[in-house]
Amino acid sequence: MPAYLLSPACKDYLWGGRRRLREDFGVQSTADPLAEAWVLSCHPDGSSVVADGPWAGRTLRSCLEEAGTKALGTHCGRFRDFPVLIKLIDAERELSIQVHPSDEYARTHEGQYGKTEMWVALKAEPHACLYYGFEREVSREEYAAAIAGGTLTELLHRVPVQQGDVFFIPAGTLHAIGAGLVMAEIQQNSNVTYRVYDYNRVGADGKPRPLHVEKALEVTDLHPVKPLDFGPHLGMCDSFVVDRYDGDFQGCCGEESFHALLVARGQGTLDCGGESREVRQGNCLFLPAGSGEYRVRGNCQTLATYIP
């Protein structure tokens, strides 16, 4: 089977940039600012679109609903919905400090998945930083008081970021991407975010963006993030596995799961299903389960995502 190039659903959140996703990653969109490109998405809030092949012009979501489990793979059978979402994020300004709930909480209160995610820094301006959990263990009362008093950042673990850095963010981890970063985000297929602090910014309507403090207090892990070891993988959880490859590599897309290939840097060639195609930075390709052996060649870095 061929590999399908995807066109992203794009978001114009107020903290987004206007240049880097277009110029550096080839994203075509009228969104202004262009904050996020959902390069692999079947979410109701924005599905990516198949750019070529027999599915061209259709949303990935509609194609997979038609193709069924054969294209998704047997490992997807345990999920109610498509399990993963992949984004490119351009943060010209800092994102809000936020937290995502667990599956159990999100299913009960929001009717969708919770959100464990991971970030890979694709570009980082000098002195770029992010917030990643608490610096030390805090109590719920201390957490609530810091939110109310505008001193929350004093409790958070602030981390300088360089290109190539990876951060795995379990559900319940307080976090925020800082200004000057372009990130690849691989996450559960969820759009549930509880905003805790937003620097007193206003939205397009001139009103302060809503906060979700009470729900955040219920779901936030009050401990520092523990070191995580994913063995040979860049990151993994029940909903996805991510591997990173520099230069040439060979893979096999079996009956167990589709593969999603995001070209994070450079350009090269993908051979799959008897076809060969040029790929470049920012391209995301969907390989249906059972596509078999494939090969990427060239001066590029590739993030490969599949379902364990």
Image (spheres, helix red, strand yellow):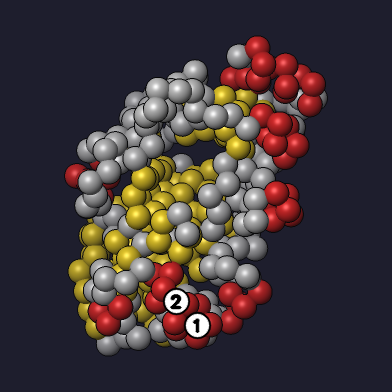
Q: Position of residue 50 (x, y in %)?
A: 31, 70
Choose top left, top right, bottom left or bottom right for residue 183. Answer: top left
Q: Position of residue 43 (x, y in %)?
A: 48, 60
Choose top left, top right, bottom left or bottom right for residue 49. Answer: bottom left
Q: Amino acid at mark 2?
A: Leu
Is residue 175 visible in the rendered image? The answer is: yes
Q: Position of residue 220 (x, y in %)?
A: 71, 36
Q: Taking 144 as reference, is 80 left or right?
A: left
Residue 221, above or below 300: above
Local secondary structure at mark 2: helix
Residue 266 marker: none
Per the image, the residue denoted by label 2 is 64
141 or 249: which is nearer to us?
141
Residue 290, above or below 258: below
The total number of labels drawn is 2
Asked whether disc 2 touches disc 1, contact meaning CB atoms under 8 Å apart, the reply is yes
Rendered residue at 47%/59% (across/down): 44
5 or 63: which is nearer to us?
63
Q: Amino acid at mark 1?
A: Gly
Choose top left, top right, bottom left or bottom right for residue 247. Answer: bottom left
Residue 166, above or below 212: below
- Pick the quarter of the image with the C terminus: bottom right
Is residue 269 visible in the rendered image? The answer is: no
Tell me the CA gap for discs 2 and 1: 6 Å
Rendered residue at 73%/22% (across/down): 144
- Pick the quarter of the image with the N terminus: bottom left
Per the image, the residue denoted by label 1 is 68
Rendered residue at 79%/26% (across/down): 140
Local secondary structure at mark 1: loop
Rendered residue at 34%/26% (across/down): 126
